[in-house]
Image (cartoon, rainbow, N blue to C red):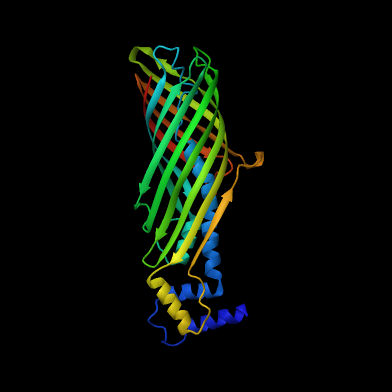
Amino acid sequence: MNMVRKLTVSALLFAGTAFASFAADFQTIAQGLYDGTLQKTIDGGLSDFAEELGFSVPQTAVQQNVYAEAFIGTIFPSVPPHFSFGVNAGLTHLNTEGLASAADALGIDGVDTSYYFPVFNADIRIGGIVLPFDIGVSFMKLDVSSLDSMSADFTADFFTFAVDARYAILKDGVVSPALSIGVGYSINRGSFGAASDYADVAIDYDVQTLYAQLQLSKTLNIPVVKIGFTPFIGIRGVLSNYSNDWSWKLKGSGVEQVTDFLKSAGLSPVPATSGKGTASGHFGEFADIQPQIYGGLGFNLVVIQITASISADLRHIGGDTNLWSGAVSLRFKL
């Protein structure tokens, strides 16, 4: 029966001039909707992309509040008290093949298969009291209505709130490096979407991230000119919990032309011209941990620090996903 349906629709698509007023894209969409292949392509692409966000978004979140020093010192008792605040800018590579596939199936052109997730956030870190620990908080809210990197009508919205705490196993000494262990948590919400005059695709993500890390650093000072350098390296284990909703729909003239075409061809019932679903994952077992390595260099000039860092997810390095992040930070630090 399915084969008969496909042959019937194919014959009608290429027959005469009865449907010459319909654009080829709408004919293809109508055929795909009727035989079910279009829904499979769209649903599969959006589901894949929604799952991709489940481990890509945490990569962005944990790279936002990276300090060169493994431990910044205590705020009390200490002279001066140790604290820092500043801003960060960075990028995370994101595989958007699934989103591009779904958009293309609906005739939405210009969605790239690779995208660089922007990061612009503010953070603050405060040293501990008596015990050698510090606590950091970071925040990002970014609404991008149109991105030049995509020729499609592409939208993105990001929100992140993160907090972490680190405890110094070793303090930075004359010879010894600083070594700390830390844990962190972040809430990440946002959306991606692409649209045309007659179709939309959208993903709303909600990701929570837990991580533990180990960081090593060593500050090298030039006292006369008050300049210093702090190279650092670390490893992390990241777990994510996510519920990412995706949806697609034809709208306006898209619905009208596809519906009219199928009715004129005598094909009924007219299939749904929209769909939705959810990709989800939960804080799991040890096997679900995403191992990451990160490192970089801090440049210290009196009370100003500029830090450049990079991070790679060892489970998703190379290939199409190739999950990595890079960031540059400017901070005031005591």
How many tags in the picture?
A: 0
Name the foreground residue: 18 vs 243.
Answer: 243
Quarter containing the N terminus: bottom right
From this view, report whether residue 243 is shown above or below residue 137: below
Q: Is residue 95 visible?
A: no
Name the foreground residue: 3 vs 239.
Answer: 239
Q: Is residue 311 left or right of residue 157?
A: right
From this view, report whether residue 95 is shown above or below residue 42: above
Q: Position of residue 64 (x, y in %)?
A: 44, 35
From this view, report whether residue 252 is shown above or below residue 328: below
Q: Is residue 272 visible?
A: yes
Q: Position of residue 27 (x, y in %)?
A: 45, 76
Q: Position of residue 177 (x, y in %)?
A: 52, 18
Residue lying at 49% horizontally and 40% vertically, measured from the top left = 187
Q: Position of residue 60 (x, y in %)?
A: 47, 40
Q: Is residue 300 left or right of residue 41?
A: left
Name the foreground residue: 32 vs 292.
Answer: 32
Name the foreground residue: 263 vs 237.
Answer: 263
Q: Is residue 124 left or right of residue 321?
A: left
Residue lying at 53% horizontally and 78% vertically, measured from the top left = 269
Quarter containing the C terminus: top left
